[in-house]
Amino acid sequence: MTEFLDLESQDGVRMPWNVLPGTKQEASNCVVPVSAIYTPIKRFPDLPVLPYDPLRCRTCRSVLNPFSIVDFAAKIWICPFCFQRNHFPPHYASISDDNLPAELFPQYTTIEYETPAEKSSSSSVFMFVVDICIIEEEMAFLKSALSQAIDLLPDNSLVGLITFGTFVHVHELGFGQIPKTYVFKGSKDVSKDQLLDQMGFFLKKPKPPTGVIAGARDGLSSESISRFLLPASECEFTLNSVLEELQKDPWPVPSDQRATRCTGTALSVAASLLGACVPGSGARIMAFIGGPSTEGLGAIVSKDLSEPIRSHKDLDKDSDPHYHKAVKLYEGLSKQLVHQGHVLDLFACALDQKGPLCSDTVIGQGNTSAWKMCGLDKATTLCIIFEIVKKDGPDVSIQPSSNQFYFQFLTYYQHSSGQMRLRVTTLSRRWVAGSGSTQDLVAGFDQEAAAVAMARLVSFKMEIEAEFDPIRWLDKALIHLCSRFGDYQKDSPSSFSLSPRLSIFPQFMFNLRRSQFVQVFNNSPDETAYFRIILNRENVANSVVMIQPSLISYSFHSGPEPALLDVAAIAADRILLLDSYFTVVIFHGATIAQWRKAGYHNQPEHQAFAQLLQAPHDDAAVIIKERFPVPRLVVCDQHGSQARFLLAKLNPSATYNSDAPLPGGDVLFTDDVSFEVFLDHLQRLAVQ
């Protein structure tokens, strides 16, 4: 696995298949899709940034890279993608074997370009949208967090504030002497034109008779815009004053009703205001919401508490009266934000190209080879799935000189400094086909990347295919993979074995079947959506922890050490630390819990016990500090009610109906099969 981690640390890319199947049939037999999991703007300590324009192929528009073939005498470079011969421009006249430009250095497969002419003067824009239908204690914490966030913003970034409850309040920050807000009714849809008229954008300057009204260029005065969007350095005092005086929504809420919360209207107003004032600039709506929307088109539940919030079953049966109206509003809002280039979390859209290099099979956002994302951070990780279209035929015997395959990712983005940058990542992989390809394919198999690609794919299928059975689909895929790449004698399960390159993959699939991405029982649709959104944006290492949590054991006998994710790991004299990404659990064995309750750790002669108790808390703090969103911390004892957070993730090797002795004195009350039974069934089916 280390070579795959090295490749990721150089280019931010992990691929399930690092040796590619060379034909369509071969790719189909490999089950796990040929894909690349790419972090477009991952931070690299030594990333070169070149202060000039990239040199591009005149045919396919790919960028000059270390895999290009260069004729130094003729000053020509040959594109490795389309084999077009391109002349170097005059300012490359001095290149030679001993004088290479940075983009031809073999170690610079990832590089960035920053053109002085393209330096952008536009500032980042942050629109805070704050729910005030929350309890006083939450309000106090939210005010504190917002004040800290405002302090951390760059001085030149533009800031706006909208608060909402029963009504939507747009705060005018440009006139700090007297607090001033514009109020919109939460139950009514507000168009962009209504917003501009009511907020007095055309008091000094008449409204243009025709054309799109967007920003200072198209008719809005900069003075009008600066009333609502001000540099952080200029409005910090006013903004903090407004936050300090912010109160809970004053409208009374009967005891049998939910608060009147017009989330959809507030987000529509925020999107329209940004679309009018700063279209195309890097802008982010940061919405802080404390409960379900109950008012306006975006409502997902009624105010009456006797009506429960919709479940997965309600959505499956189409019995939720609010669903279609809410989906229509939020889908329209997402398209509007994508069109404006603005962020509410992360929305992606496909540019409608329908070119020859686009697959007919659509997974996620398809029919294109270029995507627009309104927001990226250093950890945003995308999964690009490829389709092999070469058919089997007499010409599949491979010549050693022609089996290199190239990928190039171009990411054009606005840097936090306001400058536009182009990051270019160029990769080379080998492809194989024919009778001897199996060993090569296995040698290039990355089990972790494959598990993540399958998790993203099964989550997507669950979202869009009505009658889809995820367990059956995953099981068939795993059986097919093991049958294709396993070593066995036909109809002899005991002879079955897997290469070390594939041996952990069945374990990943076993845990994926039991994960919150596949098992929606006991999770609301909102929780399921949240889990899948995080899975679809995190890197391989973090995604693997979501699929198969890590477990660390602490005891007097040894230092912290990895433990099997199994009920057998539980022991009375152990502490376990479970990291399932969304939840971090510190679990005390029964004896440890008794000693702690007796206060032994407070006695000077039991310093070793105090250190043992503290160690998992220190390690949990490190995990929590570097993770966003922040995971939930659960501290529990064996046989306590909170222990379920650990037990639900463990392999049930000992259950209430098993004959095996109880390891650690604990047993799982579940009808789930254990990994051993799962593996036994897999072996029997794979060798048939």
Image (spheres, rainbow, N blue to C red):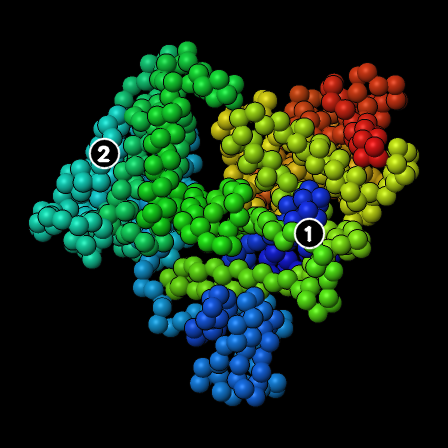
Residue at 59%, 27% (x, y): give it. Answer: 468
The residue that disc 2 covers is 190
Of helix, strand and loop, which one carries label 2? loop
- Circle 1 is placed at which residue position? 392
Q: Measuring from the top left, give residue 304's x and y in whole percent.
A: 37, 14
Which image quadrant is residue 69 in?
Answer: bottom right
User: Cα distance, mark 1 to mark 2?
Assistant: 58 Å
Quadrant in the picture for the C terminus: top right
Relative to 617, does residue 528 appear above or below in the rendering? above
Count up the numbered dots.
Answer: 2
Q: How crowded is mark 2: few (under 14 residues within 10 Å), some or many (20 or more)?
A: some
Q: Is mark 1 on a helix, strand or loop?
A: loop
Left or right: residue 28 versus residue 687 is: left
Q: Of label 1 and label 2, which has the lower sequence position?
A: 2
Mark 2 is on which residue type?
A: Val
Residue 367 vs 642, above or below: the answer is below
Residue depicted at x 59% and y 40%: 456
Asked whether residue 528 is in view, the answer is no
Residue 97 visible somewhere in the drawing: yes
Residue 507: give x, y in percent of width and height: 75, 37
Mark 1 vs mark 2: give the one in front: 1
Residue ID at (25%, 35%): 169
27 vs 290: above or below: below
Q: Which residue is drawn at 32% across and 42% down?
A: 336
Badge 1 amino acid = Asp
